[in-house]
Every structure is written in structure tokens, then in C-alpha cells.
Image (cartoon, rainbow, N blue to C red):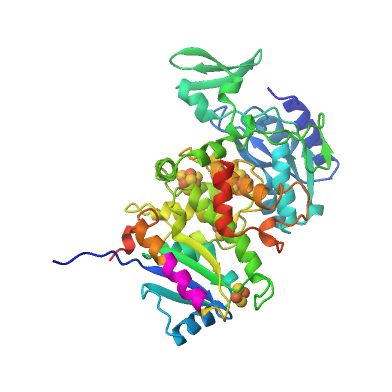
Amino acid sequence: MQEIKREDLIAKAAQLLADGTVDRVIGWKKGEFDYDVTPAVFTTKEELENEFVWNDFCGANFSKYIKKEAEKSESKVMAFLKPCDTYSFNQLLTEYKFDREKVYVVGVPCNGMLDDSKIKESASGISSVTEENGKVVVDTLYDGKITLERADVLAERCANCKSKKHAAYDELLGTEGEVLDSKRFDEVEKLEKMTPDERFAFWQNELSRCIRCNACRNICPACTCEKCVFDNPASGVENKAISDSFEEKMFHIIRAFHVVGRCTDCGECSRVCPQNIPLHLLNRKFIKDINGFYGEYQAGAEVGSRAPIVDYTKEDLEPSEAVERGEENA
Amino acid sequence: MQVNEFKPLIVAFCCNWCSYAGADLAGNNRLNYPAEVKIVRVPCSCRVNPMFILRAFQKGADGVILCGCHPGDCHYTSGNYYTRRRMALLFSMLDYLGIEKERTRVEWVSAAEGAKFAATMNDFVEKVISLGENKRLEDLRCKK
Ligand code: SF4
Ligand code: SF4
Ligand code: SF4
Ligand code: FES
């Protein structure tokens, strides 16, 4: 359950449309099922009332949609952003991806979003998902009502949420949250403690499921290159190569490397992956290394900050020491 | 009887201003280093994109070494400082994926260090031979 009500969001959006502050609103629209909420652009109050949703499946981060929308016209666009989304928003501004003046951000507090794939593990034939007394109630076609603990079906990124505080907004609905002391590096540490053979087996198992749909890249607010290396047919890794696992490894190492220092750990890549590959474990390894080698850095916390990968000091550690330090930490 | 001895393929990216000249000096001084080392000359160590390293492995390299000017001596002032951060993060990631860490290395070799160049290559090749063929980052499509 979310603190703010759907009606309040609609009222806010309708008011901004009515007084001419903005002429488009990026929000969540209902899909076929309760859990497949999709991003959409609304232009009238009627559209909002008919199709806008705000529920526990509004995971989509609109920052990247803002970039596309802002390019379309000179007028202002409004977007609802959750705390994690605002980090991506700031990061895009840092990279001059859109004009801040063309966007009106309404911050919405977030109590965490649910992961439909986790719900589907315990329920099939889902007809609705609601909440009663803090529990998730799933109505199914075959097995009647199934009650689940919210904590068990919470999205991974929400269980390890790094901040309930908005890093940017023009207006905030509800109460301002705090930066949290998250446990998001625990899984990375577990992997670091394994032997190289175990790690290799772990990743081989995960990455070999990749179907190279490129959804992780397409959704990523840090992947905004006009021309992406992975679209180059001469690269040998632009597509799924059934015969080989090199292409998967290359793709995943390079995708994660390209967003080093720019990845805000928004969690969108893991959310959209149809194969449930834990991509956040790659991104967080880089974030953890950056914090350990060059000092704490959170991309998107402030507009204009300089990422450690485009910076240096004369005393930086050597690559060989980096690998050893990574092991000591484990 | 013929013994099938493993001959690794080593790619050495050397920056034009220091390490490539260091390799030259090693040659002029008739210092031995294994013929398996194939040098790719780059304008500066920071020209080396992480893709180059992976690409070398894809095309069959068993080890990849990157050589540049000593920190502070880069011909372009700061290129190798960026290289240092980039490779620290890349190598740490390769290690995290379970790829043998001895297959990648960064070494600073100046134009006057012909002996260091030869010694580095001898040592690196020996390490890679002890690891054997690169299996974890190979691309079957690129196998002969
Ligand atoms: S979203 Fe998942 S399956 Fe698709 S390319 Fe990314 S990792 Fe592979
Ligand atoms: S790599 Fe994933 S977590 Fe990082 S910014 Fe992109 S979508 Fe978000
Ligand atoms: S994968 Fe790399 S090249 Fe492609 S969009 Fe992302 S950052 Fe750009
Ligand atoms: S020119 Fe040698 S490292 Fe930059």
C-alpha cells in the first residue's frame, strides 16, 4: 500500500494541466492485469481518471521517458518520480540530456514496489492483486484467494532501497524520506567470498539464460547513447549467438562498464529482465569497488558531480592491487 | 616422440611514447622475450577501451597485457591515470566473474626500460603458460 492515494496524484496532475503549467503528464497506466502497469503520457483529466494507476506495481522509472518527451516539444512536461527515480533524473541532467526548464517533477513517496515474478512463483491464474491489513491478497482463477507477506514479494531493489529521500523535485507530495543504510552490497560480498571457480559457475549459469532482448539496455537511464556499440553488426556481439557464451559475457561486462559512475543503482535493468538475471550484482560490484577504491560516490545524488571514472589522483591504486584488495575485502 | 607444448597467444598493448620504445630497446639490446607476445601499438595507454581487452580474448588471446608510461610521465599528461582507474575496475570485474586474474596485467614501462620490458614479458608469459589455454573468455566462433 502506498502512502499517497491515486486520487491525490490525479488531482495534482489535473491541476497542473488545467493551470497550464504543463501540457503532458508522464504517469503509470493500467495494463491487462493489475501487475503489468505501463508508462504512458496523459493530456487530459478524463484520460487520467480512466487509465491512470498508482499501486504497488508502479516500478517504472520515468527519467528516461522524460528525455524522449522533452525532445518532442517546447512546452513543459510533468512526471511523477519516486525517490530512486530522482537519482536517475539528476544523472541525466548531469549529462545534459534534457533541459531542466522543460520538466516539472512531482515527487511521490514510495513504500516499495512488488515483484510480479515473485508473486507468480506462488500463484498462477492471477485475476487481481490487492492489499488487506498489510498483506498482499492475490485472487486467482484456480486456487481462490492466496495471502502473501509483503516482504516476501517485495522487489529486490525495494527490499534494499538506498534512499526514501528525493534527490530532486519541484513539488513533493507527502512527507520527505531519509537516505537509508541499505544492505545492497551483501550479495556482492557473498560472491566475492566464493572461489573463482564457483563465481564462474554462478555467472555462467545466470548469464547463459540471457536472450539478448536488450531490454536492460533500453530501459537504463544511463544508456542514452544515440549510437550503441551493441547495435553495430560488425561487433560480433550485436545479437544472440546461440553457439557461444562469449557474446553474453562481452555484453554484460561492457554494458555494466559503460554505466560505471553513472549507474545510480535504480534497479530498472533487473526489473525488466525477462530472464530474471541479477544484473544489479554486476552494477553494484562496480559501485562497491568505486566506493572502496576512490571513496564513496553516489551517482545522481547531486547534479554536476564528477564520476570517479573520469577523474584520478596521483596516488590511485594499481590494477593489480585492485584485484587483491577486492579479495581481501571478501 | 613429439610433445605438444602449449604456446600461448599474448597480446601486449604498448603506448607509442614509452612502452613501445621500451620494446624497441629490448630488441636493440638483443634481450630475449617470447615470440608469442604480439604487440599492438596504441597512441597512449588510455586509448585502450575495455572492449579491446575482451576483443583480444575473443580472438584467441590467452593473456592480455597493457603497458604505458609511468604515472606522471604520460606523453599526454594524464592518460595513464585514467587507464589505471579503468583497468582497476575492469580487472576487478573480470575476477568477480571468475576469470583468472593472472591473464590480465598492467605494467608501466618507460622508453629506457628495455630490460624491464623483456623481464615483464617473460614473467607474464610464464604465468599464462601455467594457467593453460583461455577457456573462460573464448569465443568458439573465432577458433581456428
Ligand atoms: S534484459 Fe535480461 S535477457 Fe534481456 S538482454 Fe538484458 S540480461 Fe539479457
Ligand atoms: S544499469 Fe540498471 S541500475 Fe544502473 S542505472 Fe541502468 S537500469 Fe538503473
Ligand atoms: S551499452 Fe554502452 S554504448 Fe550502449 S547505450 Fe549503454 S552506454 Fe551506450
Ligand atoms: S603516452 Fe604512454 S601512457 Fe599516455
Q: Which part of the image, by quadrant, shows the N terminus of chain A?
A: top right
**Image position, residue A188 (x, y; %):** 56, 40
- Give coordinates of residue B117: x percent, y percent: 49, 75
Left/right of residue A56 with respect to residue B50 in the rendered view: right
Name, please, the residue furthest toward the left. Answer: B1
Q: Is residue B118 magenta?
A: yes
User: In the displayed structure, would residue B117 be above or below residue B129?
Assistant: below
User: In the image, residue B57 lies at what x, y percent?
Assistant: 41, 62
> Considering depth in this image, is A141 or A90 the residue closer to the camera?
A90
Of all residues, the one furthest to the bottom in this rendering is: B28
Is residue A169 toward the left or the right of residue B46 in the image?
right
Name the magenta segment's main secondary structure. Answer: helix
In the image shown, does A29 or B139 lie closer to the viewer? Answer: B139
Taking A177 as reference, is B137 above or below it?
below
Question: Is the C terminus of chain A in the top left, top right, bottom left or bottom right quadrant?
Answer: top right
The answer to which quarter of the image holds residue A160 is: top right
Q: Is residue B42 left or right of residue A7?
A: left
- In terms of image quadrants, where is residue A184? top right
**Residue at the limit of the structure toward the right, as seen here:** A19
Work out whether residue B12 can be spotted.
no
Question: Which portion, as a residue range, is magenta?
Answer: B115-124
> Which of the pair A178/A223 is nearer the observer?
A178
Of A225 and A158, nearer the camera is A158
All told, the count of numbered labels is: 0
Q: Is residue B116 visible?
A: yes
Q: Is residue A77 magenta?
A: no
Q: Is residue B82 left or right of residue B120?
A: right
> Residue at (53%, 29%) from the top-left corner?
A116
Residue A80: x and y in percent read: 73, 39
